[in-house]
Amino acid sequence: CEKDFLDVNTDPNNPLESTPELTLSTGIGYTAYTMGNQFQILGNFWSQHWTQSYGAGQFRDLDSYRIQSNTYDRPWQYLYSGALNDFKYVSEQSAKVDRPNHAAIADIMMAYVYQVLVDGYDQVPFSEALQGSNNLNPKYDAGKDIYAALIPMIDGGVNKITEGSLPEGGDLVYQGDMDMWRKFANTLKLKIYLRQAYVSENQSAVQTGVAALLTKNEFIETGEDAEVPFVDQSLNRNPIYQTETTTFSAANIVASNTILNYLNTNNDTRIGAFFKRAASAPNAGNFAGLDQGITGTGVKSSLLASSFSKPSSAVAGPTAPVPFISAAESYFLQAEAELRYGSFANAQARYEDGVNASFAYNNVSRTGVTIPALSSSETLEENLEKIITQKWVAMSGRQGFEAWTELRRTGYPSFIKPSASSVLGSTLMPNRLLFSSSESLRNSNTPAIIDIHERVWWDRKN
Amino acid sequence: QDRTISGTVIDKETNTGLPGVTVMVKGTPTIATSTDINGAYTLSVPATATSLEFSFIGYRKVERPIGAETNIGVTLEPDVKQLGEVVVTALGLEKEKRSLGYATQELDTEEITQGRDRSVLNSIQGKVAGVQITSQSGGVGSSTRVVIRGTKSFGGDNQALFVVDGIPINNSSINTGDALNNGVDAGNRANDINPEDVESMNILKGPAAVALYGSRAANGAIIITTKKGKNAAARNKKAEISLSSSYVFENVLKLPDFQNQFGQGFYGGEDLRENTSWGPRFDGVVRPWGSIVNNQQRLREYSAIPDNVKEFYETGSVFTNTISLDGGNETSSYRISLSDLKQKGVVPNTEYNRNTVSFSGSTKLTNKFNSTASITYTKSGGDLATSGQGNSAFNQLIQTPRNISLLELRDYKNPFNDLEGYYSPFTENPYWILNENKYTNDVNRLLGNVQLGYDVNDNFKIMGRIGTDFYNDRRFQFVRVRDAEGINGGYRNNDGEIVNASYFVRELTSDIMASYNKDLNEDLNLNVLVGHNINQRESSSVSTAATQLAFNTGFDNLSNNSGTYTSSGSKSLRRLYGIYSTVDLGFRDYLFLGLSARNDWSSTLPKENRSFFYPSVNTSLVFTEALGLTDNNLISYGKIRANYAQVGNDAPAYVIDPVFRSGNITDGYNDTDLDFPFGGIAGYEKGNVIGNPNLQPEITKSWEVGADMRFFDDRVNVDFSYYSARHTEQIVAVPVAPSSGYTAQYINTGLMTNKGVELLVSVSPIRTNDFNWTISANYTKNKNMVEELFGDTKEIGIQDGNQTTLSSAALVARVGEPYGSFRVQAYRRDPQGRIVVGEDGMPLYASENIIKGNIQPDYMAGLTNTFTYKNLSLNVVFDTKQGGEFYSRTASTMRFAGTDPLTLYNDRNPFIIPNSVIAVGDNFVENTVPVTNNNLYQYWGNLPEETNIIDASYVKLREISLRYVLPANLISKTPFGNVELGVSGRNLFIWTPDENTYVDPEQNTFGNGNIQGYDFSGSPTTRSYGANIRVTF
């Protein structure tokens, strides 16, 4: 009697068990939400696609590089306790219930997320992470050690792929097409290798790894972008759209003149795919931006966001997808790989593929647009600048975090200068994120804060 | 020679004749008589007699000189020190106050109702020591927070338990999920009680007093005894009808100070579209303002409208009527009451209504059986205003440029004021918000209990009681589609929303107890009680929302939707049973010892840990009696008391097992979530809370000493308590490092302490038959400290359910600080504490937020002066809270908008931030770069949050009431038994420190839970004043 009467403590509101299908979708959702929202805004500001408009100030601090340790608590939390913990569950549970393909996707996505974390923070918890109450103070592993572990993690995932056993659901990216995940895995590995291009002590491993991938030649191709589409219904819309356009009345983000000048100078037709024309005077009907980080000194508030170009709906509309790796990016990675470790002719071809993939993705014609060709008479760095600059253009508004990361690694586009309101002075730019206070307050192994202009481990280029 | 003296003795309590009073010639017990049923007497006295003595058991003896009088009437008042003063303690047990080894404080019906406040809780503000009562806003039907002897739990409910006639009642507050953007304070359920139905309130402060209630009352208890039918037959009546009416006006107590020198604009120039007052200095020249509509524009002198915000608020009112009927005879009695309360808010278009119907009856079935039953139905609710940074009217008001008249915006459909024509795209017409949007609630509640007693014999009694409290709260929210075109197009437009939500809460309590009372010998009395208690609490909710309205009209059915519907529901059930026992020993009516013990079994704890035991002991000594000092007038009464108690507490429901949750990802803003199903695909994430199968109950250990002393024939009364409590093994959702894969775990951890002093002093400087003056003061000092948290964790954020605070100004519990400290964005400072600025002369922020201020007051005090002259009485209550801080979003917003007088600094000319430096390498040199006209707005609009932490001290003139009781002889020929007329006022004045030019620091926008101290664009608090009448037939 006593037993029955008091045995009422099973949560009736939430399930105690899940399935790999049902939890893979939330892991991918967390990754897309983070890359498509806070990190999207961060990256697009710091790689100078977007800047803060007058009359509102939501992202003024971002433009000034005035970041606090709690500014990105939420992404940190979402990547670890959201995405990674879900992927870990999927990977482990899939083995028990015979869902090998779900495990494969989870392993590959876990590597994707860890790379983002290392690129942002350099050292992060890895080997001791995700152990729940067994370890509430996971140690921070060095970025290079985590990078070294990512390749086997991806390979392990790929090895689990089982033909004929397509997932029943939960794959928001490729709907269970495991051939696509193989290509994603290869492209991701290429990205991981190339990030280390300036790490001299890793050169042989990088070279071998890249060579194998180029030989295999199974990368994401045009139309095969790895991305999460959003849906135009309440609480299913693109997060930038919901946050910036709906909540902040689109009053903050406008085009940075850094990218706008580039696009105008080169008659680049993608300008209309990335940005809207200004809605009101004095720039009504034109593409108009602001110099990165200028604070509206002396400018009247009638010059509002609507007097400037805002992100287009293709980039920040309700259904705008969030790419993890785009086809254009895949080609630009291959172009760099060929340029460094393969054939120049292939580099040229992949570079053109990348440019074309970007135009195709944006549904605009390349005709009349100035795209500098790679030249065998130029140095590797001169050609690389063209590749990375095109990559930077292709990522505008959609892959801000990766654009910022590649800017750090290569220094390209070289015309990017620190924001006018930089608090780091006129030479320094942010090169990392601060350790999250949501972690440092609770994890005694968190290292002391490292300034945001300090470089991460692979950032070695002079 | 004898002469005849006659007169009437009036009972001060009831203002009716008091039968049975002994009237005696002083010094001559043989010449005496008693008053008759009407209180009248006639006595023949010898010429030598000089004075008469009037005495009646339980009343203070009165002596009157005879002189030449032949008619001597007196009024007798109860003598509180008399033997047999009984108070209602835990479980509804009546005990002699002198026997209690712990502090209690009683309030009678007069103290509760004299200010005519709608809320029985607000009514006792300033009158009780040890209790912090905070009315949360001036919004209609808003909630009140009651915390006794300090915050005890990191994450649990810290509010007192409310017990009505022995049955714990629900005091939940169901607030909207998102107080930052769209907060609504829909009240707390203890405010459903009609103050006119309350006979008395007894506040049980410490754990020893409430140990018998077990875990429910870990935070102290407020024991409410409702009015019952009286033995009317004894008063020669069949029944008594009483009618009480009051009408009070309400207006805003404190509005911010505004600057009145600069008007609408930006960067010092005119800008007719701005919501800021950064424009040119007022010059009185007639200029156009607002939008151009059909080539027309309104004209107005460019000058300040100092009262533009004040003019927005209306005069509110509360009209309350209660009628009650009671009657009975020696064996049975009953009482019926009906009440109606209508409140019209100071915020336009807000209202609150409350109706109660209650019945109580008791009867003796045979000589051995007795039973009582009562039932109360309450219907309450209204049309409420929202707070927060979104749709709150207040938020629009404080940003309105100083030269814009809010009254001119009232006609919100006028083309100059409508969505397209409204002057600014950055704020909304507050009248549009209040007229077009709606938030209503409708609570239907039933409270009932039945009690049956059987007296086996005079010593041995058995009693059983069962009570239930359930309510249904239906909420309805309508957010009109906002679809502005033209120059305001694109700003703040939304798709509208309709939300229907329903909450059901039910609580069931039963007690069975047996008591044995016996005088063991002439000196020793024994009272033993054993009992069994069952408590069950359940709740469920369901909510459906239309998220994109199809019609942009007032059509407010859920079918008005072209988007998706979002739905949610949840339920909760918890059970507890306990057995308890008390043993009370009394020695010669002056030395008392009480022991209690209770064991609980709770459903919310893991099976192995679900049983927990806790004891208490209390003792008191009436030393004046023990030492035979009863006839001494210097110390007329003296009692010392001491106690020690443990109280256990169980866990929240459903925190033992880890769960998966339907995916919901948010960036903290309203409606920006990614909510699964996502495009039709379901998703269940691994929950972020680590389960804990090893949870233990929480334990509070406390001790208390006190004294109750009365001097100079009771003219000076002092009641003093010192207490110390340690709250350990708390069940806290401790945040954990996200890299563990989780964000929180429920564990037993932490230590919070409360130590405090309570002092009650009352003095009667003047006490004559006609004129009395009593001063009573209370003082409370509680020192709260967070001593330990989990492991190396030094700090946790405070949250209520899913409601968190701001990342830039968070409320935290930090080791070494009182609970509820603010962690705020701060200036970057050099080692000497000077403000570090950037190359543009503007301040930089510190890379880490700092602790600045906390919500705990240093002390609280109240002062009541009561004057009575014959039938007239005047009561004046002041109270104060000193120390503690609050976060003011009003300050932040007004600086941003340039409406704060602070923004007049240096007459808005360029200035170098005083004592500021600039970093050069690792050194700091004096800053020479001024904040210029051009970035003045940036400066004031981006001050670090530490500047918005404001001293929360105040002094309030809390209550004044004047009451006139029509003399008995005047109404004796009328059908009336008693007629009282009164005027009263509450919260009439507030005094705040100079730095608080903003709002009443008592107001809090985040509901009445643990998140306190946030002024976040809520409804300002109000003052009220009005008249009242009470008549009995």
Image: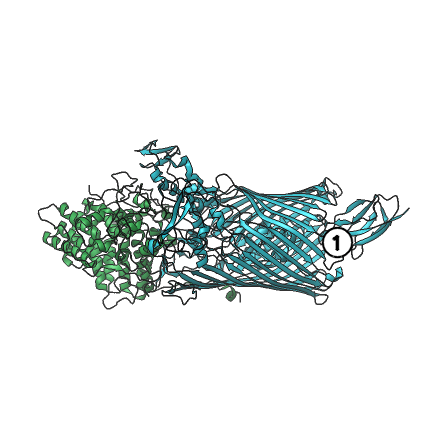
Q: Is residue B344 left or right of residue B747?
A: right
B693 lies above or below B955: below
Q: Pick the residue in front: B324 or B643.
A: B324
Residue B331, percent from left and from top? 72, 64
- Can residue B846 be seen at all in this image of the molecule? no
Quarter assignment of residue B931: top left
Give the residue type at disc 1: Leu
Q: Chain A is drawn in which colour?
A: green
Image position of B235 (left or right of B118): right
Choose between B587 and B319: the one closer to the eye: B319
Q: Where is residue B673 in the image (x, y as percent from the top left)?
A: 36, 57
- What residue is shown with label 1? B970
Q: What element carries label 1?
A: helix
Residue B628 position, x and y percent, is 75, 43
Quadrant of residue B896 in the image? top left
Q: In this view, does B71 lie above or below B571?
A: above
> What tint does the image give chain B?
cyan
Q: Position of residue B663 (x, y in %)?
A: 36, 60
Q: Which of A104 and B556 is in front in this view?
A: B556
Q: In this view, does A252 lie above or below B560?
A: above
Chain ID of residue with mark 1: B
